[in-house]
């Protein structure tokens, strides 16, 4: 989990820069290569494993849904 305001700003900055680069180069789309996607997913899993998020299912928290009756 992260501070949504900060991560939101980082996402906006990235997308803005990407759109600017695309305009400069006359591109109308971008697509991640399969190898890059796999590397990113591996990195995300590694970071999550090293955090408390792997224990999130035990929390009675809104973001896991455990506080909602009947939800798993």
Image (cartoon, rainbow, N blue to C red):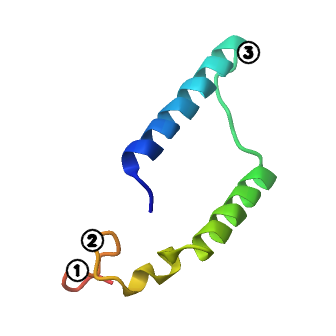
Quadrant of the image containing the N terminus: bottom left
Please tell me the numbered disc located at residue 62.
2
Q: Which mark is residue 25?
A: 3
Quadrant of residue 26 within the rendered picture: top right
The residue lying at 51 percent from left, 38 percent from top is: 10
In this rendering, the answer to whether 13 lies above or below 24 is: below
Q: Secondary structure at mark 1?
A: loop
Give the mark nearest the N terminus, 1 or 2. Answer: 2
Give the residue furthest to the left: 69
From the viewer's side, name the closer residue of 20 and 61: 61
Residue at 55% over, 73% down:
51
Q: Assess whether mark 2 and mark 1 are in contact (beta carbons under 8 angstroms).
A: yes
Numbered label attached to residue 35: none
Camera-side mark, 2 or 3: 2
Image location of residue 43, percent across then percent down: 70, 62
- Distance of label 1 from label 2 (alpha carbons): 6 Å
Q: Which mark is residue 67?
A: 1
Q: CA distance from mark 2 to mark 3?
A: 43 Å
């Amino acid at each position: 989990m992260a501070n949504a305001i900060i991560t939101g700003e980082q996402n906006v900055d990235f997308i803005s820069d990407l759109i600017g680069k695309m305009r400069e180069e006359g591109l109308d789309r971008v697509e991640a290569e399969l190898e890059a996607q796999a590397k990113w997913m591996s990195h995300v899993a590694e970071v999550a494993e090293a955090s408390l998020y792997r224990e999130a299912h035990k929390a009675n928290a809104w973001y896991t849904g455990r506080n909602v009756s009947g939800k798993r």
